[in-house]
Image (cartoon, rainbow, N blue to C red):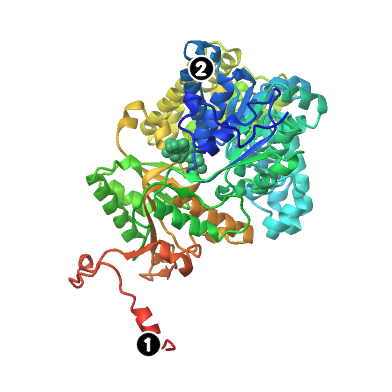
């Protein structure tokens, strides 16, 4: 098998016409070979058409006759998978015309690593000793179970404070995802927990046992179990043989486990395509390892073919030049400098403002000006490092009646009433799931933690069903409807999604009793029901909602709301893969980017630099980086105007300032000061220094 020659003349194929030569090389990789092609790594710089290229590659495979069911496509979010599928199928359908019926059934193996893992584990459950009805714990459920085990082992009563449940879970998760030893992870990332290593080891062993006894898997398990399954040669061969092509998007944000799964699926790399940009690797806190992408070619003999996409279609030249200057200061990377044909435009601005209140006022003013001159709110985005950075802006937007949607940080599924109803369904799906059962039982008047524990223990050691007679201190009127509901849900008395309606009806009186704002919460539950209609079964609903919860208020909105115009607020992490005409970055100061928490090690600092790069490369035409000069410190009442001064981010040192325009806001007249016609600050400091310059 010989890979397509890079110099081969490009044949005319209509649907590939819009691609540039590099994109086309990636799309057509291996098409001349009679066998499945060898591995391909596409390094796609920001805005270079990664999504476009991957969608065309999948479409091209379909057009050339690959069975869609034999394509495994893994993306970072389920939403990205859906979008990629839609685009690939549309391109292929257009190319195939009347023959497009062959696509029916579609790309059924498109999803996230976790989602695909969950599906394979259910299919192979019997072979690997797993209950196929396992339920999946989200992070907060996992932390609750960790806490329960921690408590049962007596660690919560130790004299010296044992690490909190969230820390325990973070240590556990890092260790398994990075495929590293506990000692290594503790010493490197959690040195203050070093004296607890033995206890942590015992805790994690008990946590794993508890999960198995209850038939639950946490997020990490979906990868861990899958990776373990792939170490059995017969299973690895069987699963690998189901797919001719395995394509992975955003490869820079995969972790060691994901890489090992991929290599086990396709040890020779045949049919393997991974796409990513090492300069945009920003998820190491989830154990993503930029080395995965850097080391990918060398896993194979001969090494994977490398195609690099460097033409940026998104940003104007000055924006790209500034972003290039920022990432140029980074250490190791594949990506060379991106270039753009998108004419000239303004250089990005660094806007100094007094504080966060002025920052919010500045942003709102500019956004409204942009709207006046024809840029929809939807084409503008405000990005920030941490969800809480947008607080003052949200206040300003609300008071001025400007609609906005916030990505990242919305905790719809963590709201108590949503969790209550989902727990009812989960408990029905898997009566061994103690965390779900513990939550649901305590909704019933008269049942507290001790009573709930006892009922669950009796269930675990007995027949596995709820007792028909009410437990002590519980009235039959409260108990019987619950037993009846659970029995019905277990037996599948009504079809999905009507069982969610049943659960909600049972929950209604409890909601009214437990919450003052029951009617507001009810609206959320109605929304949950609406979301449910999009899933084929209860199991798929629970699995996918847990794995890829709605990210933003817009994910939950009704269709009419989506037609309206609204501003986008987003954490930089959640802005990944998106683009807007006009982008504002809040708090471009040291302490925010890089975050105080992100400057422990050189690797962490490098990742913060990439975060700024990701933020900057989201902009098409205009980019404002805002630098508040001072921040009010909270929690210090009675001392008046307490604040700290902040400096411009270290990632934009003086040496690259030539790529930016420096401005200040408000200009003097707006502060009620002088009526100076000067709108840009004069560098008096420079004049002072030049007085002493050697001549
Ligand atoms: N061959 C092409 N010709 C014209 N425009 C293109 C081409 N390829 C991609 N584009 C446009 O470039 C922009 C960026 O594409 P896309 O979102 O696929 O980039 P990306 O590589 O995924 O970016 P990032 O990694 O920064 O999120 C889009 O507006 C897309 O329509």
**Residue shown at 78%/46% (left/top)?**
202
Q: Nearer the viewer, residue 314 or 179?
A: 314
Is residue 373 toward the left or the right of residue 533 in the image?
left
Residue 6: percent from the left, percent from the top?
61, 37
Total numbered labels: 2
Q: CA distance from mark 1 to mark 2?
A: 80 Å
**Residue shown at 69%/42% (left/top)?**
296
Residue 405: percent from the left, percent from the top?
37, 40
Is residue 392 toward the left or the right of residue 424 in the image?
left
Q: Quadrant of the C terminus?
A: bottom left
Q: Which residue is mark 1?
A: 691
Extreme left residue here?
A: 675
Of the numbered discs 1 and 2, the one sitting upstream in the chain is: 2
Q: Is residue 376 visible?
A: yes
Residue 654: percent from the left, percent from the top?
46, 69
Q: Which of the 4 quarters of the picture holds residue 529? A: top left
Q: Which residue is mark 2?
A: 499
Residue 73: percent from the left, percent from the top?
60, 29
Please give the label number shown on residue 121. none
Mark 2 falls on what kind of element? helix
């Amino acid at each position: 098998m010989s890979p397509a020659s890079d110099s081969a003349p490009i044949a005319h194929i209509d649907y590939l016409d819009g691609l540039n030569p590099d994109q086309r090389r990636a799309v057509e990789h291996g098409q001349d070979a009679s066998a499945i092609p060898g591995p391909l790594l596409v390094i796609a710089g920001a805005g270079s058409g990664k999504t476009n290229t991957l969608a065309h590659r999948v479409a091209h495979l379909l057009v050339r006759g690959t069975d869609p069911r034999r394509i495994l496509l893994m993306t970072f979010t389920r939403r990205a998978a859906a979008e990629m599928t839609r685009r690939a199928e549309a391109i292929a359908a257009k190319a195939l015309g009347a023959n497009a019926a062959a696509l029916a059934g579609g790309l059924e193996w498109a999803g996230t690593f976790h989602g695909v893992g969950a599906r394979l584990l259910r299919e192979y459950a019997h072979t690997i000793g797993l209950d196929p009805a396992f339920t999946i714990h989200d992070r907060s459920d996992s932390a609750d179970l960790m806490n329960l085990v921690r408590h049962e082992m007596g660690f919560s009563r130790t004299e010296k404070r044992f690490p909190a449940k969230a820390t325990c879970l973070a240590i556990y998760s890092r260790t398994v995802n990075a495929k590293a030893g506990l000692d290594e992870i503790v010493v490197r990332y959690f040195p203050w927990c070093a004296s607890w290593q033995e206890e942590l080891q015992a805790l994690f062993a008990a946590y794993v046992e508890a999960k198995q006894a209850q038939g639950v898997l946490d997020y990490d398990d979906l990868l861990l179990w899958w990776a373990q399954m792939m170490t059995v040669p017969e299973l690895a061969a069987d699963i690998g043989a189901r797919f001719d092509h395995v394509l992975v998007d955003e490869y820079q944000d995969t972790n060691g486990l994901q890489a090992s799964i991929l290599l086990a699926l396709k040890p020779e790399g045949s049919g393997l395509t991974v796409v990513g940009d090492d300069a945009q690797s920003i998820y190491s806190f989830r154990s993503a390892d930029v080395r995965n992408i850097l080391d990918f070619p060398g896993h194979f003999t001969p090494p994977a073919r490398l195609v690099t996409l460097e033409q940026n279609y998104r940003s104007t030249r000055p924006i790209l030049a500034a972003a290039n200057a920022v990432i140029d200061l980074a250490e190791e990377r594949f990506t060379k400098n991106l270039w753009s044909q998108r004419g000239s435009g303004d250089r990005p601005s660094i806007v100094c403002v007094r504080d966060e209140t002025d920052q919010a006022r500045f942003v709102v003013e500019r956004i409204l000006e942009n709207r006046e001159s024809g840029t929809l709110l939807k084409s503008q985005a405000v990005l920030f490092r941490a969800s809480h950075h947008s607080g003052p802006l949200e206040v300003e937007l609300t008071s001025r009646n400007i609609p906005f949607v916030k990505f990242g940080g919305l905790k719809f599924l963590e709201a108590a009433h949503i969790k209550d109803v989902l727990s009812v369904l989960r408990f029905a799906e898997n009566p061994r799931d103690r965390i779900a059962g513990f939550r649901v039982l305590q909704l019933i008047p008269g049942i507290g933690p001790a009573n709930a524990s006892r009922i669950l223990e009796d269930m675990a050691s007995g027949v596995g069903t709820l007792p028909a007679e009410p437990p002590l201190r519980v009235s039959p009127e409260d108990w019987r409807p619950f037993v009846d509901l659970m029995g019905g849900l277990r037996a599948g008395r009504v079809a999905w999604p009507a069982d969610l309606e049943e659960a909600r009806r049972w929950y209604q009186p409890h909601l009214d009793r437990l919450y003052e704002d029951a009617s507001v919460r009810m609206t959320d539950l109605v929304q949950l029901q609406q979301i449910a209609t999009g899933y084929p079964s209860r199991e798929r609903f629970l699995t996918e909602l847990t794995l890829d919860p709605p990210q933003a208020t817009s994910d939950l909105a009704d269709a009419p709301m989506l037609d309206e115009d609204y501003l986008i607020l987003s954490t930089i992490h959640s802005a990944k893969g998106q683009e807007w005409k006009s982008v504002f970055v809040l708090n471009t100061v040291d302490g925010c980017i890089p975050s105080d928490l992100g400057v422990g090690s050189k690797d962490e600092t490098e990742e913060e630099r990439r975060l700024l790069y990701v933020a900057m490369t989201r902009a098409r035409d205009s980019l404002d980086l805002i630098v508040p000069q001072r921040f009010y410190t909270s929690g210090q009442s009675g001392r008046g105007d307490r604040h700290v001064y902040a400096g411009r981010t270290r990632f934009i040192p003086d040496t690259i300032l030539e790529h930016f325009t420096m401005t200040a806001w408000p200009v003097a007249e707006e502060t009620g000061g002088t009526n100076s016609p000067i709108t840009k600050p004069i560098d008096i400091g420079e004049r002072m220094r030049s007085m002493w310059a050697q001549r």
